[in-house]
Amino acid sequence: MKIQTSQAGTAAKTLNHITAEAYRPAADLLRSLDSRPDGLDEAAIAERLDRDGINEVGHEKPPHWSIQLLHAFRNPFIIVLLVLSVVQLVTEPDDYTGPTIIAVMVGISVLLSFTQEFRSSRAAEKLKAMVRNTATVTRRAEDGHAERIEVPVEELVVGDIVHLGAGDMVPADLRLLAAKDLFISQAILTGESLPVEKAAPSGSAMGDTSSGPLDLPTVCYMGTNVVSGTATAVVLATGARTYLGSLAHTLSGERVQTSFDRGIASVSWLLIRFMAVMVPIVFFINGFDKHDWLEAFMFGLSVAVGLTPEMLPLIVTANLGKGAIAMSKRKVVVKRLNAIQNFGAMDVLCTDKTGTLTLDKIVLERHVDLAGGDSDEALEFGYLNSRFQTGLRNLMDKAVLEHRDLEPVARRFRIVDEIPFDFQRRRMSVVVSDGQGEQLLVCKGAVEEMLAICTQARTGDVIEDMTDEKRAEIRAMTRRLNEDGLRVLIVAMRRDPSAERAYGVADEAGLTAVGCLAFLDPPKDSAATAIRALHHHGVAVKVITGDNEAVTRKICAEVGLDVSASAQGRDIEQLDDEALDAMVERTTVFAKMSPVQKARVVKALQRRGHTVGFLGDGINDAPALREADVGISVDTATDIAKESADIILLEKNLMVLEEGVVEGRVTFGNIMKYIKMTASSNFGNVFSVLVASAFLPFLPMLPLQILVQNLLYDLSQLSIPFDRMDDEYLRQPRKWDAGDIGRFMVWIGPVSSVFDITTFWLMWHVFGANGPEHQSLFQSGWFIEGLLSQTLVVHMIRTRRIPFLRSMASAPVLALTGAIMVVGMLIPFSTLGARIGMQPLPGIYFAWLALTLVSYCILTQVVKTIYIRRYGRWL
């Protein structure tokens, strides 16, 4: 109760502080924060970091090791084992052997699970540390000079002067000092998908503070992101003192379960339900048949322990952790472990074009007038636009700014205002002045969007009205450039008398088009190879871009993609979901797409049953990254793209994705091996126990013997995460299918029971173990055969091929299973064997055992072949 009260108090205090500062005059606000417009100096920063700590929300840290250790016990199978151990202690208080064996089994499972989880979380934190989000701030250097620099978000302090642009994550709770067309997405806090407009306070007017803190137009909250516009703001609160930090306890709950999580849970509860039905049956059969209810009860408990796959959490965690570490060596940071499995299930990869299929090294290839002839004027205006914008500079801006010979021209101007870029207008403008009483608005953007706002066209000294015919001529000229693989922007301008006013989107009208800038971004040499590799592994590649359709089709054709079907954003806008679902299957290229349209395509593919990966790096990709089953971004991406992604590539390379797909399928395959081995083995064992209990005058195996056998079998499975997968398994996407597991259990489980029953017959008729006085011999014979057949099933199930001949397990699997088989055969000859009621077996038994095991492998292979032919799958 104290904790809840403390959290509520922190939240209330945070909101009161934010509301109080929302409309305070900038000078008073900076004074109260002991800050200045030119930023803080190093001494103030160090003092505030020491006072407030780093700018990090506490719930993002991994739990303390002690909490992780407790979580290792939060497994239904472990709980079942502990309950069984307590029951055994109560019913047989003088015999500690059974509880000791159970304790060893629980200890091994819990300690290994904890160790693997702890190492995986530590590794994940180290990997995440490689992906750094930064903030742009103004700070004072030692000489007192103010400079704009980038610093890690963790190093922000109260009073820092922060600059925001499109694509930035808001790094702390901020009060705006100045803003231009600023739109913020607050979906992380409100769930509202539409961005909200924010603005600095105007004059000394106080705004309305009664509608709630999230409706304050002058405040931006940590964790939200800038959709468009620019702003300068001062930090009000950092870390746990932010609004997001005060809500950390409500935002840190369990993630929504993936199909993989639900699949693991369904298998766990399937086995528990199976146990709950079968154990009472075994108990009553033995009780009525042998008339020793206590012994029947203990035997039933031991069967329950034998049915418990206590290594399941360990095997899953070990596989996922091993996959994450393997992918980190390929420069892939896995933010969420389950994303590895989703990688393996991915059958459609949607990707942007720039930097993925292309070199991401854009060069300004041509600057032309509206007739297609070379034009220095188009370049000069384009340079002014790129030089004076303060928002997010893209690769085309950087290519324009490579023409440094135009810097003397730019120095004659000073920035007056700007109208930032956004993905709806697809253009941006700057307003500059040369001090001669006139202001110049320079706008550049996509062809169609620019033609819509231009009323005149200038070619050389000739200015003419922008008629429909003229627009058609310009479109034809730019289309020819597109067909050569060039991306085209139109540059336009308008001269206005100098005026002290703020410019906005409405001012982008009545412009005169002066020319075009044409950029080249050639395809990567590796792109075609990577696409072929992805296709080989059953992954279709679709390109979803905001770029021009003609350019996109040319690049896609050059890297080997089918471009016979393409669509543009305006085509998609007119379709309902049903029509879109049909289109996405046959379409490879989607061009001129808005952020919302990208997300719609992803959802349409998912409705068609696909597991979709999306690779993107811009703010316009964030909605699609969130919708995708696997969101993939790069370390150089915008903050919001990295935050939305499950996986971060330190190198933007499709070949790395192909390797990730393979690693995901290896991880998923090894998990499925354990699940199917355990399910089928448990089913077979229970079937054998039922048969033996019904016909034998004694227990087929003592409770302690079952516990030891189960412990050895579990140990034999610990090497599965290090096994390899057959090539044909890796060629197709792998999805979770809980129904297949039940079917597999019913088909493969009884095969082992066949040879258990032949072993019963052998021990009864050949070796004379046909009475209570010979039960030790009988139990020793079944103990060895049962353990060895269970261990061999590891090799039979791990591949659809013939094991040992056409598919060999990895060295760790061979070594561990071999060692367990040897130990199992030696136990009846050991002191431990004598203590748990076993006796040495005659040498001829092992000849029969070899025949039994060879026959078991042959029959399993026959059933495997029939199963694959009937159902078309194995693992």
Image: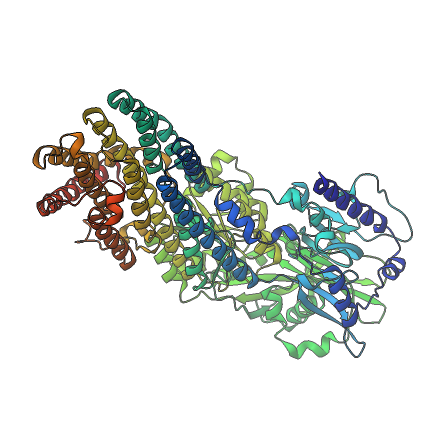
Quadrant of residue 429 within the rendered picture: bottom right
Task: Tell whether 281 sits left or right of 434.
Answer: left
Task: Tell whether 84 sits left or right of 250.
Answer: left
Q: Look at the picture and state if 832 lies above or below 427.
A: above
Task: Tell whether 37 sits left or right of 708.
Answer: right
Quick one: which residue is furthest to the front in this view?
94
Q: How many marks?
A: 0
Residue 549 picture location, percent across and down: 50, 54
Residue 767 picture location, percent across and down: 9, 37
Q: Residue at x 64, y 56 (%)?
A: 167
Quadrant of residue 751 within the rendered picture: top left
Q: Quadrant of the N terminus?
A: top right
Q: Residue at x 79, y 45 (%)?
A: 15
Q: Residue at x 19, y 27 (%)?
A: 696
Given residues 150 and 303, the one toward you in this image is 303
Q: Is residue 494 visible to the viewer in this orientation of the structure?
A: no
Q: Residue at x 88, y 61 (%)?
A: 31
For the rendered model, the colour scheme is rainbow
Given residues 163 and 352, the one toward you in this image is 163
Residue 25 picture location, percent across and down: 89, 55
Quick one: which residue is furthest to the right in this view?
204
Q: Is residue 677 visible to the viewer in this orientation of the structure?
A: yes
Q: Quadrant of the C terminus?
A: top left
Q: Look at the picture and state if 702 lies above or below 508.
A: above
Quadrant of residue 231 within the rendered picture: bottom right
Residue 386 picture location, percent across and down: 67, 67
Q: Look at the picture and state if 91 lies above or below 185.
A: above
